[in-house]
Amino acid sequence: MNDFTSTEFALDLVRESDALYVRVSGDFDYDTCDELVEAVTGSLTGDGPPLRGIRLDFGGLTYIDSSGLSALLLVHRRASALGATLFLDNRPDFLERMLQITNVLDHLTGPPPD
């Protein structure tokens, strides 16, 4: 019997006070990246107190392409514009390599500009 890991994309969002927790699962690519951008943007501009932190949990990530990386840069830009800090938690090795090769890890996870 084969044990295939599902690559179906899914987001689980939880907002607690001024923080947003997003679990990202499956393939994060051209076909799915807009879902994350829209979900985070909606939370940033929605009702409630302003967000101070956005934690993206990549423990269930199975794949990311350049569109996924571009989406992360866009999420960072929108979060920073509103004073929120982006955190990239539980990064699998392939995501870590992509962030290091493209030299954007420090940019994505640094504090928002004053």
Image: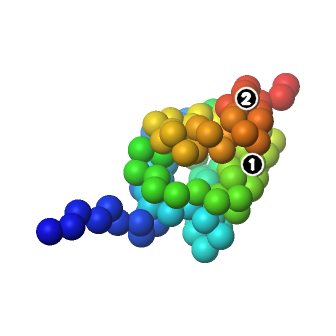
Query: Outermost residue, right direction?
Result: 114
| SS at circle 2 | helix
Q: Quadrant of the C terminus?
A: top right
Q: Position of residue 40 (x, y in %)?
A: 61, 54
Marks 2/1: CA–CA distance:
12 Å
Q: Which residue is mark 2?
A: 106
Looking at the image, how many numbered discs can be counted on the residues?
2
Amino acid type at image mark 1: Leu
* Mark 2 or mark 1: whose residue is earlier in sequence: 1
Is 65 left or right of 13, judged from the image as shown? Answer: right
| SS at circle 1 | helix
Where residue 55 sits, quadrant-wise, is top right
Q: Quadrant of the N terminus?
A: bottom left
Q: Which colour style is shown?
A: rainbow
Query: Outermost residue, bottom direction?
Result: 31
Is 106 left or right of 65, judged from the image as shown? Answer: right
Q: Residues within 10 Å of mark 1 (few under 14, many from 20)?
A: some
Where residue 10 sits, quadrant-wise, is bottom left
Point out which mark residue 73 bears.
1
Q: Position of residue 90 (x, y in %)?
A: 46, 37
Amino acid type at image mark 2: Asp
Is 67 left or right of 57, judged from the image as shown? Answer: right
Q: Position of residue 112 (x, y in %)?
A: 77, 30
Compare residues 93 and 32 and report the one nearer the observer: 93
Q: Residue at x 74, y 56 (%)?
A: 70
Q: Residue at x 41, y 66 (%)?
A: 7
Q: Residue at x 50, y 63 (%)?
A: 27
Compare residues 80 and 74 and report the one nearer the observer: 74
Q: Residues within 10 Å of mark 2 (few under 14, many from 20)?
A: few
Query: Outermost residue, front direction?
Result: 1
Q: Is residue 60 visible?
A: yes
Q: Residue at x 83, y 28 (%)?
A: 113
